[in-house]
Amino acid sequence: MNNDTPPKEEAEEIMTPDEVARFLKVSKKTVLRRARLGELPAAKVGRAWRFRRSELLAYLTPEST
């Protein structure tokens, strides 16, 4: 077993609204609005919004029908 690989929970990248805006190439205002409306997968920690990179990637991946 490779001890250099962190457990999956630790490897999960948590992103800020600014990072998500750069990642999605939209404004921070758009990110926050879509998070508030439940259109983007997000969690509010105190007054701050946080996003999991893996959930954003899943959100962007179209479902096959």
Image (cartoon, helix red, strand yellow):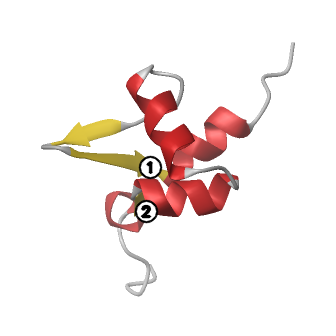
Q: Position of residue 58 (x, y in %)?
A: 64, 38
Q: Position of residue 54 (x, y in %)?
A: 54, 49
Q: Position of residue 49 (x, y in %)?
A: 31, 45
Above or below, 24 against 37 in this view is below
Query: Is 60 left, or right, of 55 in this rendering?
Result: right
Does the residue at mark 2 contact the one at mark 1 (Cβ under 8 Å)? Answer: yes
| Residue that label 1 marks | 52
| Residue that label 2 marks | 13
Point 35% across, 66% down: residue? 7
Q: Quadrant of residue 63?
A: top right
Quick one: 17 or 63, which is closer to the camera?
17
Q: Can residue 29 be seen?
A: yes
Q: Tell me the CA gap for discs 2 and 1.
A: 6 Å
Query: Is 5 left, or right, of 24 in this rendering?
Result: left
Query: Is 46 left, or right, of 20 in this rendering?
Result: left
Quick one: 30 or 2, which is closer to the camera?
30
Q: In the image as oriented, which residue stretches furthest toward the top?
A: 65
Point 37% across, 74% down: residue? 6
Quick one: 24 or 64, which is closer to the camera?
24
Point 80% across, 28% down: residue? 62
